[in-house]
Amino acid sequence: PWYGGRHARLPLDAQWCDAWAQALGEHGAGSGGGGREAAERAAEGHGMRLPRPNPFVPENLAVLPVVSQGKSPQELPSAALPPGVARAFYRQDDRFRQPKAVAAFRIHSPTCAADARSFLRAKLWCSAVVEELNEYAYDAKAAGLSYSLSVTKGGLEVVTWGFSDKLPTLLDVVLQKMRDATTVRPETFAIVRDRYARGLRNTAEKQRPCDFAARRSRELRHSLAFAVEDQLEALEQMSLADLGGESQRLLDECRVELLATGNTEREHVAALASQLSSKLGIVAEPKTLPMRAEATFPPGYTVWRLDGTNVEERSNAVRFEMQFPISLDNSVYTSLFVRVLAPRFFNELRTKQQLGYIVQMSGSEGDGFLTIACTVQTEYPPEFVRGRIDAFFE
């Protein structure tokens, strides 16, 4: 009817009505019906029930009035922060004006940065918590809310986003599940362990040469990057008992930083910080935090040659990287450099010289440097391709 489509209104089949009335009568509703309660009792007799009320459906869609603010996020004073929360930033949405917000929490925990085994254990624990949260995932998504929990360099990251009215409700569920996950159910552990085993083996043994080169370079340069091979070795020796008490190891002593943007204000951000601190039960901040650092390339031109791990792969890969100090000016210059030269790099080495199917130039920002990377996956000898890359820049 809304779109002018052809339709018809027909009476219900009499046999259906008789069958429904009989079902109600069999479960104590009587021939006269009995309303909603009788229908629900009858449905339960057949193993059916109505879905539970969705706790994440927003009730208040009001957009907060815009307050005067600068372009950068504002920081809450330390006196307004609860124990365990070191810094909190926020910025109100003054452009799109929607009743939505994003709240991201970076939880710095030295435990997961000790070695490859500790890092993998934290990843398995996070995956187990996410697996247990699946019972809320559908309701949250249906109500326009989402969440994520993952391991980052030196800690964990919790992100919630969607309608701001019920963002605290969703955050409460996620944090409670994290704190209660002192143990992991055997079936959940089996699921996440198998998932990681397959993923790590594929990465260690079946990576494309271009991805293998990028990964090994990243593992070499970054202080908190643990080799996939070391993680796989740790996984083979890890059992369900190893995850016992992981929530206390990760959360009892940690340092939290918060960023909230969207339909939010200072009071809301302070409330989110207090909610996280109380739910996680943070005891104290760690005395030292894991150092996020990036190794400096030696002066001049360094060549690192590695044999691939995929025995079925016939191609080679050459990855050419250049480092630049991090600064606003260098960030702009490297972005322009890549934007201008990437198409020419592809046209020269891929289209004209036909050195390989994968030819690309990209830029990235690491823990200590800006990096421009040129990658060519090829069946030609690596030394020849490296010479062609050098010739392009000359």
Image: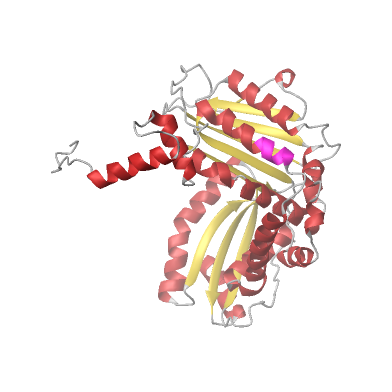
Name the spot of residue 379 as percent of width and height, x first: 54, 82
Nearer the observer, 247 or 381: 247
Residue 174 seen in render: yes
Residue 295 seen in render: no
Residue 131 part of the magenta segment: no
Nearer the observer, 39 or 103: 39
Nearer the observer, 182 or 343: 182
Q: Is residue 98 above or below residue 44?
A: above
Name the spot of residue 372 as percent of width and height, x first: 58, 57
Q: Is residue 229 above or below residue 20?
A: below
Q: Please name the predominant secondary structure of the magenta segment in the image.
A: helix
Q: Quadrant of residue 389?
A: bottom right
Q: Residue at x 48, y 27 (%)?
A: 93
Residue 178 part of the magenta segment: yes
Q: Quadrant of the C terminus?
A: bottom right
Q: Quadrant of the N terminus?
A: top left
| In the image, farthest residue toward the right | 287
Magenta residues (range)? 175-180
Q: Residue at x 64, y 40 (%)?
A: 158
Q: Residue at x 59, y 27 (%)?
A: 90
Instruction: Count the labels in the image.
Output: 0
> How is this picture coloured?
secondary structure
Name the spot of residue 216 as percent of width and height, x first: 68, 65
Name the spot of residue 115 as percent of width and height, x first: 81, 56
Q: Quadrant of residue 218?
A: bottom right
Nearer the observer, 326 or 210: 210
Side of 48 where 121 appears, left or right: right
